[in-house]
Each structure stands twice: as C-alpha cells, then as structure tokens.
Image (tube, rainbow, N blue to C red):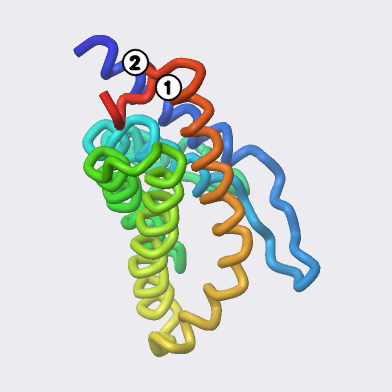
Amino acid sequence: MEKNLSHIALFAALVAVLGLVPAITLPVGVPITAQSLGIMLCGTVLGARRGALAVLLFLALVALGLPILAGGRGGLGVFASPTVGFLIGFPIAAFVAGLIVERWRAPVGIAALAGAVIGGILVLYVFGVAGMAVMLGKTLPEAVLLATPYLPGDLLKAGLAALATQGIARMRPDALLSRA
C-alpha cells in the first residue's frame, strides 16, 4: 500500500515537472508540450489503476490552484477552458494505456507503444476534441482539424514512452508495475 502511494505521488510529480518543460514549436507553428508524455508513462509504467490515480492526484493539485499545467496554468478556471476535454481524458488515457500493457502479453516495448498510442493519443483526442468542440462552439470536424497538427508530436511522445517503459523493464523489472 505504502509503495503504491509513493509511486502514485512520484508519477503525479513527473506529470507536473513535464509541464514545466518549455514547449517545442514545430515548423508549422504548433507548440508541443511534454505533459502528455507523463500521462502515457503513468499508464505504461504504473498500470491502469495506479496510473489513473496518479493523474487524478495531479488534476486535484491543478484544481487547488497549483500552476503545474503546461504554460504555468492551474486553478478551477482551466476546467472551463477549451482544453477541458483533454483534462477529463487524462486519467482515462492513463487507464487505457496501462490496461493494454497489463493485459497484452506482447513484448513490453510493443505493448507500451500500443498503450501510449491507443490510450495516450486516440482516447485522449476523443475527449480533447469533444471538449474543444463544445467550448469553442465548433463542429467535431472543425475541432479535429484544430487538434491534427499536434499528432506528430504526440506520436513522438508515444515512442519515447515506449522506449522509457522498455528501458525500465530491462533495468528494473520490479519497478514496472504494469507488468507486476
């Protein structure tokens, strides 16, 4: 129990720290932040339940006003912004990514890549695009077009999450709770 709480707190902190990493602007002008990499890692490393709990802890800290979202944002106001769908989708994305790694007995790197892409991109975009459509008064196709430029950066983050998860599995197999 105590070890689980430590891992959950540690990964909530990881997501917060990744929000402090300066955005990388793609040549097309789209800023890519590292925060969703943390969401992917919560699931692929901690597993479904613990990964989702880590993200929920992170969101609770955001709601309390800590400026730990990318760009130094925090507080209840972010839950009324165009990114609210992504925030709602964060714990679900971590859960799905973790569930895939837990249940699919493919090599850990492949399972982690699948989990990061399906949970950390596909599931997250479903919630994020829906939230953008509602908050911005756009149609779903219009909201999809707004989110599409972020896809290359998110695919890169999914690859990094898979490599990190595979590295943890190699170096410290006991630390990979998604396969415990």
Q: Mark 2 belongs to which amino acid?
A: Ser
Which disc is residue 6 wearing? 2
2 or 20: which is nearer to us?
2
The image position of residue 45, as x and y in percent, is: 39, 32
Residue farthest right in this picture: 27
Q: Secondary structure at mark 2?
A: helix
The image position of residue 99, as x and y in percent, is: 25, 44
Q: Is residue 26 above or below residue 142?
A: above
Name the residue at 28% across, 52% down. 92
Cα–Cα gap, marks 2 and 1? 6 Å
Disc 1 crowd rating (10 Å Cα; few below 14, some 14-19, many 20+) is some
Q: Is residue 5 above or below residue 154?
A: above
Disc 2 crowd rating (10 Å Cα; few below 14, some 14-19, many 20+) is few
Name the residue at 34% across, 52% down. 93
Q: Mark 1 belongs to which amino acid?
A: Leu
Q: Secondary structure at mark 1?
A: helix
Q: Quadrant of the N terminus?
A: top left
Which disc is residue 10 wearing? 1
Q: Does the CB distance between marks 2 and 1 fall below 8 Å? A: yes
Q: Quadrant of the C terminus?
A: top left
The image position of residue 153, as x and y in percent, is: 62, 59
The image position of residue 74, as x and y in percent, is: 48, 45
63 or 114: which is nearer to us?
114
* Residue 64 seen from this side: no
